[in-house]
Image (spheres, grey):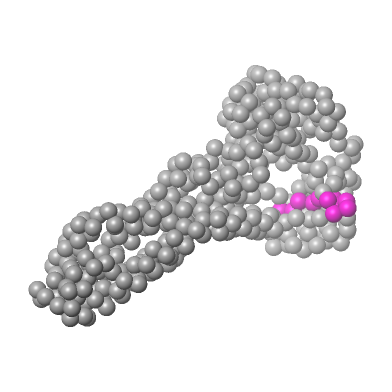
Amino acid sequence: MIRHLKILEYALSSLVRRKFKNLSIIVVYTLTISVLASILFLTHSLKLEASNILLEAPDVIVQKISAGRHDLIPAEYITKIRDIPGVGTAKPRYWGYYYDALTHSNYTLLGSDSNLTGLSLLKGSMPSDSGQCAIGKGVSDVRLTGIGREMILVDSKNTGVVFTIVGVFSSESSLLTNDLVILEKEDLIKFFGLKAGSATDIAVKVHNENEVQTVAGKIKQLLPDTRPITKSEIIRTYDTVFNWRSGMMLTIFSSALIAFCILAWDKATGISAEEKQEIGILKAIGWDTGDILVLKFWEGIVVSLTSFLLGIIAAFIHVFFLGATILAPVIKGWSVLFPDFRFVPYIDLYQIFVMGFLTIAPYIASTVIPSWKASVTDPENVMRG
């Protein structure tokens, strides 16, 4: 142990002597790790955020399909779905998207009785009368408005409609409520000009979760012009989308990986004359080949582990404290009105281990191998170059 501590002490002093070279390596190494870790942290956090959204989601969402696109669904379908064995409840949902030209933001408008779950008021109340609305915190912030004030939205007839804000709410997931505006059901139907006796879709709850796929199949068989979407399918879709976007980001930043590989390869192909001379001197004063390899091993460990930890810390701060300001606009998607992301810090140790193995091990190898070549050479020849 004392021997290794003494070698480590000498390794640190050797690194300090070549501080500018090692500092440049640490900077490049740290940036590479921080980019990779930020993408992985952000993707995993978005998946957790999506999981929070779907905790109270319906077991099956039934949409009517016309010409391959989502269409309004007739209300009489609800009775047919309720008669299917295993179905607990089947309720219509009224909602739609609205583009606000004033703030250049996309809102989600939802009817007040459309299975509101997972929502909690920050202040005020839910709309209980015509002309009232409750808004998400993101809408409140971007509109610079709050309870008691009026909000004007342009309906399907291009007419401005005035709503009085009676509540501001949030939920466990900011993705769910940040751009949400809740209206009275009749107000929403009139606002979008929905056909009488129709809904946007139908939310179905199943008694036994093991029968969800069976119920979805029966709905499709009974109502062939519909598309039943199960909760598990929605979860898989979220995972696929975020994995695809994170993969796209990794591809974009592949140049950082290539730069790191070039750096490691350049270090593996040879060492500087100064380092060779140092190895020759150490051999001349009694160090053996094993001591030289241990010395270079500790140098590689110090540089790679320091860079790895700095990169992980930088990525952690970037994602969980700064809201992933650099990467989030690409991975979060199309919406203009983004929530103020403050994810619950969570690290996948398996991802950290794999990333560490793929970055630390090659660098240590590229440090030790060329040093071994120099250490087995006659000291006199090494010092002469």
- Measured along the vertical axis of the image, is residue 67 above or below residue 281? above
Residue 118 in sight: no
> Which residue in the rendered view is the most extreme toward the left?
285
* Towards the viewer: 12 or 178: 12
Instruction: Report whether 55 appears left or right of 59.
Output: left
Query: On the rendered image, what quadrant is the C terminus found in?
Result: bottom left
Quadrant hosting residue 357 = bottom left
Q: Residue at x 85, y 46 (%)?
A: 71
Magenta region: 59-69
Q: Residue at x 88, y 45 (%)?
A: 74
Say if the magenta span includes residue 344: no
* Towards the viewer: 276 or 306: 276
Instruction: Report whether 99 appears left or right of 50.
Output: right
Residue 329 in sight: yes
Q: Residue at x 75, y 21 (%)?
A: 162
Say if the magenta span includes residue 60: yes
Quadrant hosting residue 249 = bottom right
* Towards the viewer: 206 or 312: 312
Instruction: Report whether 362 appears left or right of 136.
Output: left
Q: Position of residue 344 (x, y in %)?
A: 48, 46
Query: On the rendered image, what quadrant is the N terminus found in?
Result: bottom left
Main SS class of the magenta portion in the image: strand
Quadrant hosting residue 291 = bottom left
Q: Position of residue 90 (x, y in %)?
A: 79, 48
Q: Position of residue 131 (x, y in %)?
A: 76, 23
